Amino acid sequence: MAKNCYMVRINENQFDIIEQKSVVAVGWSKWNFADMKQQELIEKIGNEYNENGTVPQLRGRKLNEISRFLSIKKGDFILVPHWSSVWLAVADGEYIYDEQAKEADLANQLRVSFLKDKNGDNRCVARSQLSEHLSRRLHLRGATVLDLYDFNDEIEKIFANEEYSISKIAAERENELAKNFKNELLKSICNGDVYLKSGGAGLEELVRELFECEKYEAQILPKQTYKSYGDADISAKSKFINILAQVKHHKGNTGAWGIEQLKEIKKNGEDEGYDKLVLITSGNICEDVQKEAEQNGILTMDGKQLADWIYENVNELSPDTRAKLKISISPHFI
């Protein structure tokens, strides 16, 4: 029987939990996946999303992720993103509910066997060893569980070939270097210690180029494109998805105004032709603003995520943009 392949994303603060218990896990810890039939579960969670006023697009995406997680069968291959690498796991087929993991919102778990390297550590495969298409799919923002059916052949080859592997020490050192780089980069952007244009225009140009790095046709929109106080800065279109983005160059917290501007666009029906609206900021997004965005089907990207995005595409940025960000591309030992 052919194996299916999936990605299950875990918060980086929870790697130790899943490694020690040999599980992958998802949220929705209010419900016990192991004790409920899939259809009943989907109906109950769907009803709660409706009662909370969650927009249909977000509701559908989340329910699809639950269905994918519950579709993983014994023997299926699972990729777990782990910093700048991925862990390899084989599903054991047993779903469990761990009361002790409710606080971390990881109560719904699936037992797996992690592949080990010659030192007995979880086998790490660098993202640079993956095809560009697979690497980009794993970077899909906001996704917790993905079906990787289109990449079955490549993934089966990776599982079978131990040459697809880096040491745990190298992976940890690479993560440390990347973390320091991203922290310094974000601090420099927020403090204006880079050579981007002032007044937010420079950040808009950077975001436009980042979309272009990911094969979108992107453009900065003229001011007063939208009625009333509705506003968006960038239109990014691809073969698969069209995105309308509001960009805020902030230091500290980003308030709800950007969300209100995107909501006004939706209210006036001016988002026709776009699949997603997103607020992108160099600042922080507090919990109430995040909740408002989610309830209205608006995606968000805070400063930390923006730094991640720049890091993922740093080699694709133009030399001029890298110079403006004061980034030097040179080989180094890890």
Image (cartoon, rainbow, N blue to C red):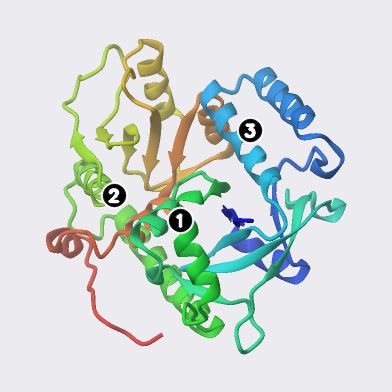
Front of the two marks 2 and 1: 1
Considering only order in the chain, which callout, 2 or 3, is on the residue closer to the N terminus?
A: 3
Q: CA distance from mark 2 to mark 1?
A: 19 Å
Q: Which residue is mark 1?
A: 151
Which residue lies under the disc numbered 3? 63
Q: Nearer the viewer, residue 135 or 141?
A: 135
- Circle 1 packing at 10 Å, graded few (<14), some (14-19), many (20+), is some
Amino acid, disc 1: Phe
Element assignment for label 1: helix
Residue 260, percent from left and from top = 42, 22
The residue under the point 50% across, 63% down is: 155
Asked if labels 1 and 2 touch by Cβ distance under 8 angstroms, the answer is: no
Mark 1 or mark 3: whose residue is earlier in sequence: 3
For the point 45% across and 63% down, the residue is 154
Say what secondary structure mark 2 lies in. Answer: loop
Residue 321 at least partly seen: yes
Frontmost of labels 1 and 3 is: 1
- Relative placement, left or right, of 168 versus 269 is right
Q: Nearer the viewer, residue 117 or 54?
A: 117
Are dots 3 and 2 in contact, CB under 8 Å? no
| Amino acid at the residue labelled 3 | Leu
Looking at the image, residue 334 lies above or below residue 109: below
**Callout 2 amino acid:** Glu
Q: Which residue is mark 2?
A: 214
Which tag, 2 or 1, sits closer to the chain's start? 1
